[in-house]
Amino acid sequence: MANRKEAEEAVKTILEYLENDPTREGLLDTPKRVIDSFDEIYSGYEQDAADILSSTFNSEGYDGIVLLRDIEFHSTCEHHLQPFSGKAHVAYIPVERIVGISKLARLVDLHARRLQNQERITKDVADDLEEHVSPLGCAVIIEAQHGCMRCRGVVKQNAVMTTSAMRGVFFDKAEARSELMQLIQSGS
C-alpha cells in the first residue's frame, strides 16, 4: 500500500494530466486536500462490522420486524471512481437480541465508505446482520443513482438502481416480504 506522500504524488500526476498549469495557486494544496478527503470518504476500510454490531440488547420478547428505512448513503463506484448515492432500507426480525438503530446506519456507512458496487453493499450488510445478530430473517434493499450513469456513458439522469438481499424468513416466506414492502412503502 502506498504511503501518504506517494498518494499525494499520484494526485499531482493526475493534475498534470488534466491541467495546463498544475502549479497555479488554486491547485497547490489540492493533492493534500484530496488525500484528506479520501481518508474520510473511504473510512469504511478502517471499520469492522463485528465492532459495530457487538453491543446488543435483550429483545424482551419482541419478534416483529425491525426496520430502519431511508438511510442515506454515499459511495464510490469501483469501476469509474464516480460517486453513487441513495437510500438503504435495513430490516431484521430479532430472536433474542436487538441492536441500536444507529448501528444499522453505521453498518451501511461502513460498506458504502469503500470502493464499491451496489450489489456488494447490499449483500455485505445482509451477511453482517445474519452473522452478528443471528435474526430470524434480515433484508436489505438499496435504491441509488450512479454518477457513472448520470454524467458519462448513457447519461441517464433519473435512472435508479434497486438491489435486494433477503435472508431467513424474508427469503422463505412471501408474507414476511409483503409485510416488509408495505412498511417501506408506507413511509414513502
Image (cartoon, helix red, strand yellow):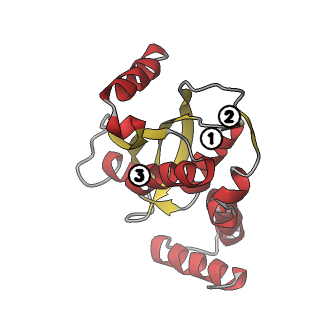
The amino acid sitting under disc 3 is Gln
Q: Position of residue 106 (x, y in %)?
A: 66, 46
Q: Residues at badges 1 and 2 in contact (C-beta under 8 Å)?
A: yes
Image quadrant assignment for residue 110: bottom right
Alpha carbons under labels 2 and 3: distance apart: 22 Å
Q: Mark 2 points at which residue?
A: 101
Q: Residue 28 carries which label?
A: none
At 45% from the left edge and 63% from the top edge, which residue is drawn? 81
Which element type, helix, strand or loop, lies under badge 2? Answer: helix
Which residue is nearer to you in this view: 68 or 50? 50
Q: Where is residue 114 in the image (x, y as percent from the top left)?
A: 55, 61
For residue 47, side relative to residue 187 (left or right) = right
Image quadrant assignment for residue 185: top left
Crowding near the residue tagged with mark 2, few <14, some 14–19, many ≥20 C-alpha atoms within 10 Å: few
For residue 147, say whether it is visible.
Answer: yes
Between label 3 and label 1, give the one nearer the viewer. 1
Alpha carbons under labels 1 and 2: distance apart: 5 Å
Alpha carbons under labels 3 and 1: distance apart: 17 Å
Image quadrant assignment for residue 93: top right
The amino acid sitting under disc 1 is Leu
Q: Where is residue 179 in the image (x, y as percent from the top left)?
A: 40, 21
Q: Residue 118 carries which label?
A: 3
- Which image quarter is the N terminus in? bottom right
Which residue is nearer to you in this view: 94 or 101? 94
Which element type, helix, strand or loop, lies under badge 3? Answer: helix
Crowding near the residue tagged with mark 3, few <14, some 14–19, many ≥20 C-alpha atoms within 10 Å: many
Q: Earlier in the sequence, mark 2 or mark 3?
A: 2
